Image (tube, grey):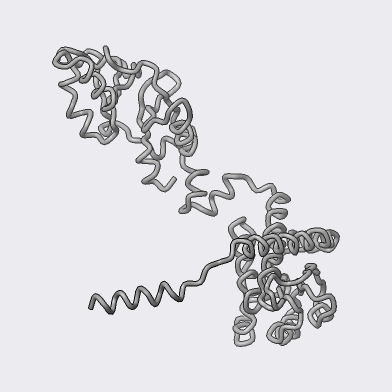
Amino acid sequence: MGSLSSCSDLSIHETQVNVDPNNLLKLFNSQQKYLNYFFKNLDLSQTLIFTQTLLNSNGTIFFSGIGKSGFVAQKISQTLVSLGIRAGFLSPVDALHGDIGILNGNDILVLFSKSGNTEELLKLVPCVKAKGVYLISVTSLESNALMGVCDFNVFLPLERELCPFDLAPVTSTAIQMVFGDTVAIAMMSARNLSKNEYASNHPAGRIGKSLIFKVKDVMKKQDELPICRKGDLIMDQLVELTSKGCGCLLIVSDKNHLIGTFTDGDLRRTLKASGEGIFKMTVGEMCNRHPRTIGPDFMAVEAMQKMESPPSPVQFLPVINQQNILIGIVTLHGLVSAGL
C-alpha cells in the first residue's frame, strides 16, 4: 500500500504545471489595456440615453442573454432589484416556451450579446415586439442583426478578447459587467436612494445589519449585565465576573450611574502585583474609571469601530444614556455573533 501511495504522489508531482509569473503579469497588463480601450471609446451620449430610459420606465426592466452574456444580464438585474428597482432576468429559451407571458407593454427588455447575432435573441425579438415591449440591445460588434431590429442599441467598444485566440468571452463580459453595474449606480444616485432604503433591501446580510442594527438592538441588558458596587470585594465578585460572558464587571453607583469597569485582565494584573492583598481590595479601588462607552442609538457597526480604535482594542463597551446611567453592554463577541 505504501509503494502505491508513493507512486501516486510522484505521478501527481511530475504532472504539475506551473504558471509563468511574467506571462501572468503580461496578461493583467493586456486586460488593463483592453479595458482602457473600452473606457476611452464608450459613447457617453448613448449611455446617457440608455440610463435615462431605464430610469423613467413605468414597468419592469428585464434583461436577457445567452451563455456568459446571460450570466451578466442576470447579475445586473439582481443589482437593480437590490436597489429597489423593478427588474428581472428573462431566459430567451424559456421565453419562447411560455415565460414571455410575464412581459407587458410598459416593460423594457435589454438584450446583452457580444456579437449581436445571437440566434435565440433574434428569434425572441418579433415575439417581444408583438407585446409592445421596448427593446434595447447592448452589443460589441459594430454592424449586427440585433442593432437593426431593436428600438435602441448601445455599443460597447471591444478591442479584442484577452484569450490568445480572441475567442473566449472574458474581456467582453468584463466590459458588459462594468457597463451594467455603473449604470445601476447612476440610477441609484439619480433616485437619491438613502442608506436606510438600501439596507431595507438587505436585512439578512452583513450590509443590511451594519446599516440597520443599532447598539440597543444587540446589547445585553438588565439581568445579563455583570453589575457590582464600588465597595464590593474583588474576590466576592469572581462569579459575576466570569458567569455573564462579558469579560468584565460594570461598577455602578446606587443610582445606577456608571463608575467604571473591572476586567479579567485587571484581575490578573492585580493578583500579580498584590498577591494575597487582593482578598481585601474592592473593585472600586482597582477599576478603570474612564472606560470607553457608547450610547444606545449609535449604529452597531460604529460600536465595533470604537472597540477597534487606538490606542488599543477593547472587547466591550458599556452602554450609557445621556445621564451616564448604565443601560447595557455591547461585546465584540456579540457583534460578531450577530453577523456584523
The quarter of the rendered structure image containing the C terminus is: top left
Residue 338 image position (x, y, % from top left): 39, 46
Total numbered labels placed on residues in the image = 0
The residue that appears at 81% across and 80% down in the rendered structure is: 144
The residue that appears at 64% across and 86% down in the rendered structure is: 96
Nearer the observer, 187 or 177: 177
Residue 15 appearing in the image: yes
Residue 45 image position (x, y, % from top left): 86, 60
Instruction: Give the vertical position of 322 relative to 93 (above or below).
Output: above
Nearer the observer, 330 or 274: 274
Image check: 9 left or right of 64?
left
The residue that appears at 62% across and 45% down in the rendered structure is: 194
The residue that appears at 35% across and 30% down in the rendered structure is: 328
Image check: 200 left or right of 29?
left
The quarter of the rendered structure image containing the N terminus is: bottom left
Residue 124 image position (x, y, % from top left): 70, 84
Nearer the observer, 290 or 123: 290
Image check: 65 left or right of 130?
left
Instruction: Give the vertical position of 53 relative to 97 (above or below).
Output: above
Nearer the observer, 308 or 340: 308
Residue 149 image position (x, y, % from top left): 82, 81
